[in-house]
Image (spheres, rainbow, N blue to C red):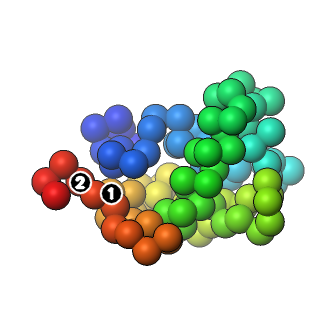
């Protein structure tokens, strides 16, 4: 995913977070994102929640996440993340909205 393909709600670090969750099945918590030196806590927890809100991570319980099939398809370039709905009920917005 190129920076010019990243939707407004995402930040470049989100792809790194998704890659980490995909690469290692022992990674399941925001603390693992911090340990991988991707971003500091509490930003890691916030980003995991945002990714879960858009269906890219699944939140099993507080602090426990897993990459979804959708998250893997976004990383593979099969799904445009700009078209993902916010699981909380709102649609994501683009600059055209």
Can residue 4 be seen here? The reply is yes
Pick the residue in front: 31 or 27: 31
Q: Which residue is mark 1?
A: 82
Q: Please, is residue 57 above or below residue 28 in the view?
A: below
Can residue 80 be seen here? The reply is no
Pick the residue in front: 40 or 79: 40
Q: For the residues labelled 2 and 1, say whether their Cβ atoms are less than 8 Å apart.
A: yes
Pick the residue in front: 53 or 1: 53
**Residue at x 28% of width, y 57% of height:** 93
Q: Position of residue 29 (x, y in %)?
A: 79, 48
Query: Would residue 8 be found to the left or right of residue 62 on screen?
Result: left
CA gap between label 2 and label 1 equals 7 Å
Q: How many other residues sit within 10 Å of disc 1, few (<14), some (14-19) or many (≥20)?
A: some
**Residue at x 69% of width, y 35% of height:** 42
Q: Secondary structure at mark 2?
A: loop
Q: Quadrant of the C terminus?
A: bottom left
Q: Position of residue 45 (x, y in %)?
A: 68, 44
Q: How many other residues sit within 10 Å of disc 2, few (<14), some (14-19) or many (≥20)?
A: few
Q: Which numbered disc covers residue 94?
A: 2
Q: Earlier in the sequence, mark 2 or mark 1?
A: 1
């Amino acid at each position: 995913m190129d920076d010019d393909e990243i939707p407004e709600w995402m930040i470049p670090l989100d792809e790194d977070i998704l890659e980490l969750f995909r690469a290692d099945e022992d990674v399941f918590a925001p603390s693992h994102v911090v340990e991988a030196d991707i971003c500091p806590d509490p930003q890691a927890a916030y980003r995991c929640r945002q990714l879960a809100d858009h269906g890219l991570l699944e939140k099993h319980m507080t602090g426990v996440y897993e990459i979804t099939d959708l998250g893997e398809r976004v990383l593979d370039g099969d799904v445009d993340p700009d078209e993902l709905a916010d699981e909380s009920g709102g649609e994501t917005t683009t600059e055209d909205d």
